[in-house]
Amino acid sequence: PEKPYPVLILLHGSYADGEQWIRLGVPEAANSLIMQGEISPLVIIMPEEIYSMVSYSESTFGDVLIEEILPQLQAAYPICTTRECRAIGGLSRGAVWAARLAFLHWDVFSSAGLHSMPATIPVLPEWVHRIPEVELPRVYMDIGDADKNWRYAKEFEEMLTLLEIPHEWIFQKGDHTEAYWSAHIEEYLRWYDEGWKE
């Protein structure tokens, strides 16, 4: 390519695997939007967290992703190496990972998509105070009105508002299922794409 491809890392949920986003139709949706000129060509990375029931604080998944997988891919492929053209997103457990990694590694990611986030992060204010105001990641949050975890997601969204973190909050019809996420894949991809164009 004339310039490196932007990078989107998508994280799966609990009891799922690295192919969850494929089942949801991400490759087909991305190819279609690229061919129509609606989003830029990009590289999508879908890593698998094998031990997806381990607590976040005890898991090495995030460290391995940032310190090993991403550098190896950057060495092998023509992908972006700056935060401005890197985003991370996740659904369910993956959404919590995406939030953790975006705020702990704000120098790596400029955007975070939190889809059906089933928990909040009480230490978020402590993390945010370490980030320069102009470097705060942009955040997209969505969850279905029939999702049993929507109150946790709303609590986290209220923390974002209190901390003056730029974000979009989408509360819409749906539940905590692959049918819900699949129905909104194109919306997600368009939002991630907006980040490289700002």
Image (cartoon, grey):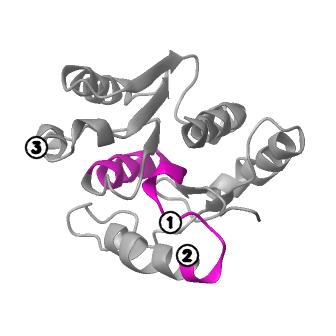
Label 1's element? Answer: loop
Q: CA distance from mark 2 to mark 3?
A: 30 Å
Mark 1 sits on what residue?
81
Residue hosting label 3: 126
Q: Residue at x 62, y 67 (%)?
A: 79
Residue 79 on the magenta span: yes
Point out the tag, 3 or 1, that comes first from the N-terminus.
1
Quarter in which the N terminus is drawn:
bottom right
Report the mark closest to the observer, 3 or 1. 1
Pointer 2 or 1: first along the chain: 2
Q: What span is colored magenta in the figure?
A: 74-103
Q: Position of residue 193 (x, y in %)?
A: 63, 40
Nearer to the camera, 168 or 71:
71
**Percent of width and height locating residue 152:** 29, 29
The picture quadrant where one finds residue 180 is top right
Residue in the picture at 40% in, 64% down = 52
Circle 3 Cα neighbour tier, 10 Å, few/some/many (<14 / 14–19 / ≥20): few
Residue 71 in sight here: yes
Question: Where is mark 2, residue-wise?
Answer: 74
Q: Position of residue 71 (x, y in %)?
A: 47, 78
Q: Residue furthest front?
A: 2
Task: Name the secondary structure under disc 2.
Answer: helix
